[in-house]
Image: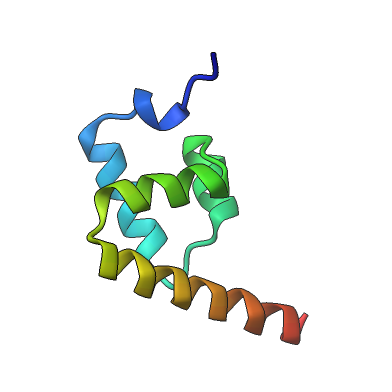
């Protein structure tokens, strides 16, 4: 059985992860280095904590940022 690292986090840590993920200046790599959550786990956490519409808007924004970063590398 796989243990999800997000299950071991307290409410304050989860709130901080959500705030970081919603920020346009924080990458999934930074979240992983601080909390040990992979991109897939952050997305799962966001999906479970945000309203459906908010999650969809966030995912669209994250995708557009990653597309732009790839263009400018």
Q: How many marks?
A: 0
Tell me the residue at 43%/46% (across/down). 44
- Image quarter in which the C terminus is found: bottom right
Q: Is residue 52 left or right of residue 6?
A: left
> Is residue 32 or residue 64 the one in the foreground?
64
Where's residue 38, x and y in %? 57, 42
**Residue appearing at x 36%, y 23% in the figure:** 8
Q: Residue at x 64, y 84 (%)?
A: 68
The N terminus lies in which quarter of the figure?
top right
Vertical order, 39 against 53 (above or below): above
Q: Quadrant of residue 64?
A: bottom right
Residue 31 at x, y = what percent?
49, 48
- Compared with residue 4, is residue 14 higher up or lower down, i.e. above or below? below
Left or right, residue 64 beside residue 8:
right
Q: Nearer the viewer, residue 5 or 32?
A: 5
- Which residue is more in the foreground, 42 or 31? 42
Q: Residue furthest right?
A: 73
| Residue 33 x, y percent position in the rendering | 56, 42
45 is higher (above) or lower (below) than 19: above
Colour convention of the picture:
rainbow
The part of the image, by quadrant, that contains residue 63 is: bottom right
| Residue 60 relative to residue 2: left or right | left
Name the residue located 45 percent from the left edge and 52 percent from the top edge: 43
* As drawn, 4 above or below 71: above
């Amino acid at each position: 059985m796989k243990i999800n690292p997000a299950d071991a986090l307290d409410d304050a840590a989860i709130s901080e992860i959500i705030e970081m993920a919603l920020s346009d200046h924080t990458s999934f790599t930074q979240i992983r280095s601080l909390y040990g959550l992979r991109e897939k786990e952050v997305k799962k956490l966001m999906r479970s904590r945000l309203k459906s519409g908010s999650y969809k808007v966030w995912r669209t924004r994250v995708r557009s940022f990653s597309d732009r970063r790839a263009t400018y590398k």
